[in-house]
Every structure is written in structure tokens, then in C-alpha cells.
Image (spheres, coloured by chain):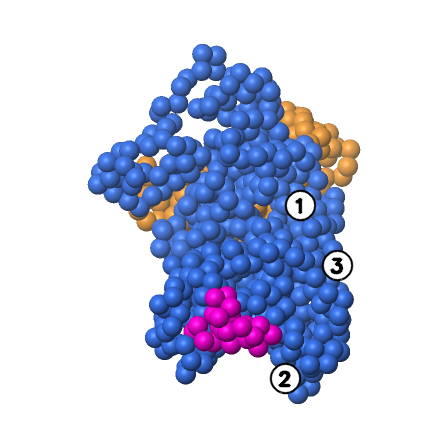
Amino acid sequence: MHVNYWREVHTTGPGRIGLGLLILVVTAAVLAPLLTGYQPAAYTGAPFMAPSAQHWLGTNDVGQDIWTRLLYGARTSLAVGGGVALLSLCLSILVGCSSALLGGLYDRLMMRLVDALIVIPPVIVAILAAAYLRPNTVLLIVLLSLFLWPGGARVVRAQTLSLKERMPVYAARTFGAGRLHLLFNHIIPDLGPILIALIIQDARRAVFMEAGLSFLGICDPTVVSWGKMMQHALKFVYLDVWRWWLLPTGFTLSLTVMGFTFTGFALETALNPRLRKEAGHADN
Amino acid sequence: MLTIKNLKASYNGLQILKDINLNLEKGQVLSVIGESGTGKTTLGRAVMGLLEGRCTGEILFKGKNLLTCPEEERRRIRGREIAMVFQNVEDGLHPLYSILYQVMEAVLIHGLTDKKAAEKRACEVLELVGLDNRRSLAYPHQLSGGEKQRALIALAVVNNPDILILDEPTASLDALTKAEIIAVLRRITREKASLVITHDISTAADLSTHMAVLYGGRIVELGATGDMLTGPRHAYTRGLLRSYPNMTTTKDLQGIPGRMSHHVEGCPFHPRCTQRIRICSAEAPLPAVEGNRLIACHRGGIVPLLEVRCSKSFGPLKVLQDVECILHEGETLALIGESGSGKTTLAKTVMGLLKADEEEIRLEGKKVTRRTIDFYKRIQMIFQNPGESISHRMNVLQTVKEPLDIHKTGNEEEKLERVRQVLNEVELPGDDAFLKKYPHHLSGGEAQRVAIARALVLNPKVLIADESTSALDASVQAKILKLMMNLQEKRGLSIMFITHDLALAKKISDRLAVLLKGRIVEEGPTSEIIYHPLHPYTRALIDYAPLLEDRSARPAGSRWARRTHSGTCGNSLQAAPRLKRPPSATSTGCPYANRCLAVKDRCLEERPELIACSPRKVACFYPPVDYKIQSN
């Protein structure tokens, strides 16, 4: 009856890879000051130095240590990813649950809003908004969240619609429980696994979109970002530097996104009993 | 003929009778029933003037107050105009004289001097009560119990008194002797005014025209015997009837909680009453006329707790059509019907889980417009499948505590205490190990008990049980039902029991409502409906209710063949004639018309309304002819 999601995830192949990658990136981000002696913005040496014992991945056009920037870039990526995931999840729950529980006109209006938001291309709006307002990390998180919540809201609403027809919810209603009690004591606990899956998915998309937007120049100029690093590196592809500037950055971004993807995939397998059976974990 | 006004009697300062008011006319037989110690015999003796204690008030016999009349006068009346058949046959007769002599003595005392005439009269009376000449010469020790009882009756009636008081005339007699004695008494009491004092309700039912229920020295209910038996209105009367084993009622025996005490302020019954309110302990209720009854109760007798009238449709499908039912305090109403008849919809609509198209719900007499948190405090529901209705994320403690959390009653410690208490009530352990169990650790019976505990934790008065035991084994079901019946006895829980199992309903319900396609087609006291079903649908349900008998050993058509109430043996549903034009689902006719054996044209065109057919209601144009339909 109770699926141990943790065990389900970390015993499958993709789950292990995904979690491993995520743990690696998170550790690197958290322990950044220990893994490098430099500050990301400091000019530490001559420009375009090749990798050496002092500069593991060499230096960039203005002599900043690339390894250091890579580590601190992970912080930005994860901060945006985590922030967006949490904020958009909150919005998804708020709109999804309230629509399902209240129903009626409110439900229909909200779902049409969701439909409308899903068809708006996020990048263009983000560019326009960032151009209008001064781009910074918090603004980016809010903007991305505004684009990512509708998908989650749909999932949450659908699940809540099914959960609210369950007997324990009916039973709680016969004790006189209000909607908030139902939400916090019966619906959200049962939404748990789906919410985790949503968080992972939102985080993955957020990391990717943050990199993309900063590649296009929509970012806080004072903050180190992988997207921005790649964009800078691309300007110097005629030199050899791209090998230790562009490639490692691209790889790190890909590995982070892959980490999220694999974890999400493993979670989905664990959540869906039918997939679980195919994966040979039915009797676990 | 005999009027008792404000009669009070006491022994050594202990008041046994308090404000008795009675009126007895010629031809009436009034039975006084009640538990032992309620003052029944005292009442009889007071009328006879044989009471050792103090008596105040008035006993008017032919306009004369017996309590103030001189002893001389009383002696003349006693035995001649008012006679009593004493309780305890062993002590009533003198062992040294023959029966005939003792009866003769009674005649001679009251003025008849001619011995021959007295003997003739005595013989006549003995003959009348069923003792022939030979037996009448016998001595008491030579007679059987029944014969002694007859002799005592002869002793009392030999002077042809106007008023006959019978004190436990059938106690300690076997059933056949009892029947004979009752037959004798019926003949004798026809021309007299009689007072039958008994704890044996069947004797009272057989003999009396009216019935008075005595409790703690007060008359708590008085009315015509038939009415009282089918519809007791005082909680004590109902308790007495429920605890009396008999062949008429079908519900399992239930007692009355607590025990009787004479030192009670206010209503004598209130310590044992499950519907008491504050005033009950403060002052004694005065008898008041309620319909055709006299009831002494501050609440006017058993109160209707839940009155429901609702309609509900899902799209074009009318699931409930003007269903009306009343649930009284401490009573079980069984809602019977096949699946799809709207039973669960009714339960959910009452609980507010479904929105009715039209509804009028009264809880304790107050109209319910919005289902507030207080509504749910009074009325709770038990769902069909305990495994489903208990959240798999909650352990026993959390599950049972949830209603308390919602209602914000007390702090955590008090809640825990209450949870343990209610678990104890449903016979589950309240220890920490059990409290930490999750639903999938529990057996079906345990889980259902937890669900019941959860429904009871708020102390509701009404419990709606929707097929609550159908998922359980018969043995577990029996335990759960016992539990519910005990709770009903203890705290006056009203239960609306929704089931498709008629045999089950028969055992646990006081009243039965038969639901067919969202309409109630028959409703009334359970035993009445089970033994004399009027609606053909009810009859079909009864015919197919579970039996425990080997039908192969009983050839069809024999006296012991499967009992069916529709008058046929065997499978009457298969034999049902199919109509040439089956009524469509939307037809205006009787909902049972397409399956009814006795269907007539009228049934296809018109829908029968529920009509009173005392003491039940039935919706059928052509019920069996021997029942007289009364128009209301």
C-alpha cells in the first residue's frame, strides 16, 4: 500500500544515475568556496590561459578562473531551478486544488487561464519583460514560475478531482471538516509523490530556461551563469579556449538537466504501478 | 365506576405511589404494567383498602371515597363489590379447608345465610373457572398451580363484584395453563371493570383494553393496549417491550440501562432515560394528553430526532422521489431495498455529501438549512467499506481523533483520553501499540470498529449506517451489530440502518422502510411488516430473504415447505407473468408494476400514494383484502 518512493527511485538504473548527478552538482555548488581558491569575479591571471595546476580549466578573456565560474554558475542554476520549482509548485497547488475543490465558474475561468498561459511562448515574453524591467535573479525566478505553473496546475487539479471523491474525504466531510482541513490533511498528503515529480520537472525546465535566457543576455549582469559563460565562449571559438571554456560548461549544464530528467523518469516509474511492474519492481 | 385521584401511598415515609390518577369504566380492563418494585401491587391493595402504609388522595367508587369511609363499610365492599385475586397462588388458600368450603365461606360472609344456596353458587363459579365438582372438594395441596389459580379466581368472583383486581394472575404458570386462565378471565371480566396488575406484558396484551405503565410510583404512559404495543411513546414503555421475549417482535432483546430507585427527584425515570434534559431531574412531569395517549414526560414521549423529506435526481434519473422518513430517539430504522433503489443516495443526501434537489430535514425538531459543524456533531455516518473510508495515511489514533481535531474539542491529552474511551466502548484495545496501527494492519472487523469509534467519538445521537457490515463475515458482523445495539441501549443512539439484507433488518430494527426506485412503498413496525407484508415488493423481498433450512427434506406444498407470504411455495418471481406492455422507466404507474404478480390496469396508469394502514403505511392499490385501508 505504501510505496517507498526513495527505494523505488534509488534502486533503478536511471534513478541512480539521476540522483548521482544531482548530488554531484548540488555538492559542487554548496562546497564551491572549498573547491576553489578564487572568487568568480576576480581577475586571477592572464587571459586565455590553458588549464594548469593553478587554473584547472584555464582562464577566460579577462583572466577569470573558469573552474571557479563553473562552480559558482551551478549555484545560480540551482537557485533559479529550486526557486522556480517551489514557486511554481505553490502556484500549481493553489490554483489546481482551489479549482478542483471550488469547481463551478471559478474552475472554468482558471482552467481557461491555464490554457492561455500554456500557449504563450515564454522566451519572448521573458525577453520583453526583462528588457522593460531590469533583469535580476529574483525577477527571473518569478517570470519563469509564471510560465511553468499552468502545466502543474492541470495535473494537480486532475488528481485533486479524483482524490476528493475518495471515501476518507467523504468521511471527513461528515465530521464537518472544512475545505482547508480536507486540503491539508487529506489531499496534499496524497498528492505528495505527484508534487515531487512536478518539482523535479519544473526544476529541470527552469535550469534549462535560465541557461537559455542568460545565453540570450537576459540575466543579472553581476551574476555568474552558465548560459552567459557559453555565450562569451562562443565569441572566441577561433581560439583553442572553447575546449576548456565552452565544452565543460555545456557538459555541466547537460549533466544537470540529465540528472533532473533521470530522477524524474525514475519517479514516474515508481508512481505508475503499471510502469513499475514492467520495470520488474512489482514485488518490492 | 372507579376513579382514583392524586393517590399517594407510603410505607415508613418512603413514597411508593405518587399522584396516581386513573379512571375505570364498566367493561374496561386496565392493565398496570411495570418492573417489580414500581408499586403495582401497592396500587391494587390501596384500592382494596388493605394497605399497611399511609394513603392520601381519593379513591372514588360509585361516588364514595373509599379512603375516608369507615372500616365497617369497607369490609362490606371488600370481596363483594371490589374483589382481588392475590398474587402467589401458594399462600392464598387455607390448607385445612377444601376449595369448595373456602369459596362458600366467601359467599356466606357477605350476607347469604342459606348454606345450600351458597354451595350451589360456589359450585357454579368453580365450574365457570374450570374446576369440576370432584376437584372442588380437594384441598389446596392436592391441586396443581393452575388449579389453585382457578380456585383463587373463583374466590374473588363468587360474589360477582363490580371491580375485579387481578394481581399477577398468570405468574408462574406454564404457557398452556396461562392460556386457559386467560380465557377464563376474559369471560369473567367482560361485565366488570378490572384492574390487571402484571409484569407479564403478553397477559396484559391478551386481557386488557387499556394499559397503564407504572414507573417509580407514577403512571408514565396510558393508552389503548393495541396502540401501546405497536407504538410505545414513552421511553420506559419501549424499554419494557424491547426486553420482553415474545413471538411478535423480531428485534433482539434490549434492556433498560441502570436500575430503579425510589429516591429520585424529578421524573422517576430520568436517571435511566437516554433523552433526558435538564428539567427532567428538577421536576416531575405531569401527565399530558398526546394524541390518544396520556404521557408523563417533559419531552412529550420519545422525540423524533431526525425527520427527512427529500428528492434527488441525477440528470433525468430520479433517484429519490419525495422520500419521507422519521427516526425517533433510540430507535433503529432499517431502510431496505435492492441495489439502485436509492438507499445510499438518501444517506449521502442527509449527510450533505450530495446536494438534494429539494429537501426538508429537521434535526431534533429544528429545521436544518445549512449543515454546520454542530449538525455533524449530532449526526454521523458509517460507510460501507471500512478499508476505504479510513485514510491509509492515518493510524488508529489519528483516524479516531480527526473529528475531535475538526471540532477543536479540548487539548491533546483530553482528545487522547476520549479516543481511548471510545475505543474501549467499541471493544478495541486503547493501548499505544494499537493506536499506532495503520488500517492495513487491521482486520475487517477491527477496521469497521475503528470506523464506528470514529463516528461515535463526537457523541452523536444519530448514526447512519450505510451497509456498514455487508463487507464483513457473518460472525464479525454479529459482533458489530451487538455492539451497535448495546450502544443504542446505553445511550439511546438512533440508527438509520441501510441494508439490502432483510434478515438482518429484522433482527436489529424497530421500524422498517422499504425503498423501491427512490420511493418508500411500505413503512411500519418491523415485526408487522415481516409477518404481514402488504406490498407485493415487500413480500417478494421476504420470500427471498435468507433461510436456514433444508428445503429438499420438505416436499413442496407441505406444511413445512418454504414459507412464503405471497401464498405460493417456491419461486414466485420466476412465475411472475410478463406484461404485454412493460411500463417504461418514466411511466407514471406503480414502480413495481412490471414485476408485480397482481398487476392490474390501474397500476400501470396511476402511481399509488403511501396510505396509512395502521400501524403502517403502504403504497399499493390492491393490498391483501383482509387489511382495511384507512384514509388519513
Dot 1: few (<14), some (14–19), or many (≥20) neighbours within 10 Å? Answer: some
Give the residue drawn at x 69%, y 51%: B292
Amino acid type of the residue tagged 1 in the rendering: Glu
Chain bearing tag 1 is: B
Where does residue A147 sit, x and y in percent of width and height?
65, 34
- Circle 1 residue: B307
Where does residue B5 sit, x and y in percent of width and height?
75, 68
Chain bearing tag 2 is: B
Question: Are the residues flagged by discs 1 and 2 in contact, CB closer than 8 Å?
Answer: no
Q: Colour of chain B?
A: blue
- Circle 3 residue: B288
Chain bearing tag 3 is: B
Give the residue drawn at x 54%, y 20%: B603
Kindly indicate which chain is depicted in orange in the rendered structure.
Answer: A
Give the residue drawn at x 52%, y 56%: B186
Left or right: residue B399 versus residue B162 is left
The part of the chain drawn in magenta is B99-121
Q: Secondary structure at mark 2?
A: loop
Q: Secondary structure at mark 1?
A: strand
- Circle 2 residue: B52
Magenta stretch encompasses residue B108: yes
